[in-house]
Amino acid sequence: MPIDQDEIQALVSVETGEIDRRIFTDQAIFDREMREIFGRAWLFLCHESQIPKSGDFFEAPMGRDNVLVVRQKDGTIRAMLNTCTHRGNSVCRAEEGNTKNFMCTYHGWTFGIDGELVGVPQLESFYKNDLDLSKHGLRHVAQLDTYKGFVFATFDAEAPTLIDFLGSTGRLGIDLIAEMGDMEIVPGVGKFEIDCNWKLCVDNLFDWYHPQITHMSATYANLPVEVDDAFLEQARDAGGARTPDGTEIEFSSSDVLDFPDMIGVFGEYGHAIAGPPADPQKLAQQWRNRPEAIEALGPLGIRIGGHPGIFPTMWITEIGQVSLRVPRSPTLTEIWWFNFVPKEAPAEVRSFMIEVQNHLFGPAGVLEQEDGENWAQGTMHAAADQSATIPHLLKMNLGRGKIIREGGLARIEDATNEHAQLWTYKAWAQWMSGSSWEALAEGTTPGDTL
């Protein structure tokens, strides 16, 4: 049963920090998300370094659709739906590669790398030449553009430009990986599924409250020493957390992931960055001292650490990775991981970066295995009859976030909080209301408080 606009607004209360758990399991809500969010937003597809030569292609998700992102003979990039215009089969079964054309394996209809229909078997004998090939090429996305090598597209011809969609917050988020150096992607994309709603994965990007409990075992299981130096901060106790036998959990400063201070940056359309301030003196952050990085990021950007989130589903880590949370159903999400390294980095540095990236996140990542269990548990209980009536809470430091404006960015500096999660859900509700682009921009522009 379709869900109306008034119902959507009632699902998210920024004032009370309460979110209706139905948004994590309801099929009608999911269907509306596919239309109002994934059918309109600019979505990350791939990096230009994945398709350097003419004929190189990469299959990328856009909501429930898949598109082929293809480097053209003139060096430009096009993206088109991977569905034959005859009977709907895939015209390409490979996830990436190089080709001179795309052929549907049902009847043999063949399309050029530009999407034009160039071959139909028995065109003369069966169709009597009465088929206009020019009208049956692959359907292209409405707009495609790149920012610092990152390729985005939208199905909405009326959408703002990519630069305007990203805004200062989204551009800074990408700058925080692009300015690590001349970045190129490590071949291959890690993919795996988790039985959870995609929004719980996005919610977790900005959650710096959970590491001291969720990732305790990963810490004890020997995170790389350099990662310890980058993440382990002065600790507080666990605030009353107790084991099943009643023992209160306390931590020393050497064995807890704890983050007492936060910087949150909030932008139009739901983009956000949140996390502890960066320390350019630490090994993993010394790229911030590069003159090019200082110029690109500015004095505020240099200080901003944590995880950028490009609404709706793109996540950028501090260690050179990009992830997509690809919704497959209300209760199933496919996680994609792209690893990046600087082209000019010595072989041993590149090798170490890849080792750390794969150790923390991805199919075998110690952190994401623990996170995934949380997301699956939250989704499972959101589908239960009585449990679903309990709201999803985001009340930490609620009402204490005063917006500071500097360098075209809106930020909050505070103790650990849940402002970024609330900002994301507020934007989600605005998108789901079916607002015009003008109203959407206005409704997701930060005010004086959050």
Image (cartoon, grey):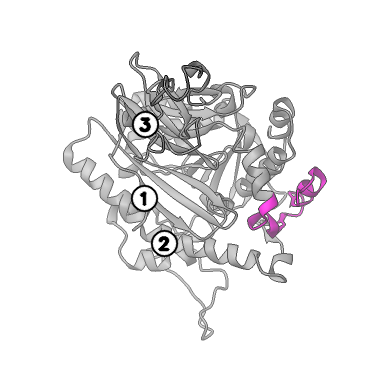
Whole-Å distance between the Cαs marked 3 and 1? 49 Å
Question: Which percent across, then down, holds residue 268?
Answer: 63, 32
Q: Give the vertical position of 386 relative to 430 (above or below).
A: below
The residue lying furthest to the top in this view is: 74
Q: Name the one closer to the observer, 27 or 124.
A: 124
Q: Residue at x 38, y 26 (%)?
A: 121
**How far from the left and from the top, in percent, is residue 270?**
62, 38
Q: CA–CA distance between discs 2 and 1?
A: 21 Å
Dot 1 corresponds to which residue?
230
Label placed on residue 103: 3
Q: Is residue 14 magenta?
A: yes
* Amino acid type, label 2: Gln
Q: Which amino acid type corresponds to the residue marked 1 in the rendered image?
A: Ala
Q: Residues within 10 Å of mark 3 (few under 14, many from 20)?
A: many
- Kind of residue at badge 3: Met
- Residues shaded magenta: 1-28
Q: Quadrant of residue 167?
A: top right
Give x and y (percent) for residue 293.
38, 27
Q: Secondary structure at mark 1?
A: helix
The residue under the point 80% across, 49% down is 7
Pointer 2 residue: 369
**Furthest-bottom residue in this view:** 245
Q: At which x and y percent is residue 152?
A: 48, 29
Total numbered labels placed on residues in the image:
3
Write the residue at 32% across / 49% down. 357
Q: Residues within 10 Å of mark 2 (few under 14, many from 20)?
A: some
- Front of the two marks 3 and 1: 3
Q: Quadrant of the C terminus?
A: top right
